[in-house]
Amino acid sequence: MKNEIHILNLVVSEFPQKKKEITALYFQSTSFLEICEDYVMCKNSIKKIEANGKSANDKNLNDLKIAFSDLKEELLSKIKNEL
């Protein structure tokens, strides 16, 4: 439960204007919770790769950034469509 609240807080910090909607969906929709988990995991992976600064990870970094962008769109779409 503690980890779930941490993930929720991270997502809300990204979209504070949507706090109410995010919180409601987070506890009502398993698919939304999974998107949030993937979003946070992807963001953390990007930060880790960027912190290492290894050029060998450029393709991985680009792939992660694309996935992150897709997850962001999916997250925002769920907020818009499910409430």
Image (cartoon, grey):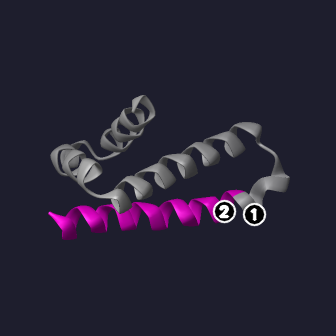
Pointer 1 local density, CA inside 10 Å: few below 14, some 14–19, many at least 20: few
Give the magenta range: 61-83
Asked if marks 1 and 2 touch (Cβ < 8 Å), the reply is yes
Q: Secondary structure at mark 1?
A: helix
Q: Which residue is mark 1?
A: 59
Q: Is residue 27 left or right of 73 when viewed as pictured? A: left
Q: Nearer the viewer, residue 1 or 78?
A: 1
Q: Secondary structure at mark 2?
A: helix
> How far across and down, in percent of the image, does residue 36 sit?
41, 52
Q: Is residue 69 left or right of 82 when viewed as pictured? A: right
Residue at left offset 20%, top offset 70%: 81
Q: Is residue 11 magenta?
A: no
Q: Is residue 20 left or right of 4 when viewed as pictured? A: left
Instruction: Give me the C-alpha separation between circle 1 and circle 2.
Output: 5 Å
For this orientation, the residue located farthest to the top is 2
Residue at left offset 39%, top offset 33%: 1
Q: Amino acid at mark 2?
A: Asn
* In this view, 7 is above or below 33: above
Most common SS among magenta residues: helix
Residue 20 picture quarter: top left
Residue at left offset 30%, top offset 42%: 12
Q: Which residue is mark 2?
A: 62
> How far across and down, in percent of the image, does residue 27 sit?
26, 48
* In this view, 7 is above or below 39: above
Q: Amino acid at mark 1?
A: Lys
Q: Is residue 62 magenta?
A: yes
> How far across and down, in percent of the image, does residue 10 sit?
39, 38
Q: Nearer the viewer, residue 28 or 37?
A: 28
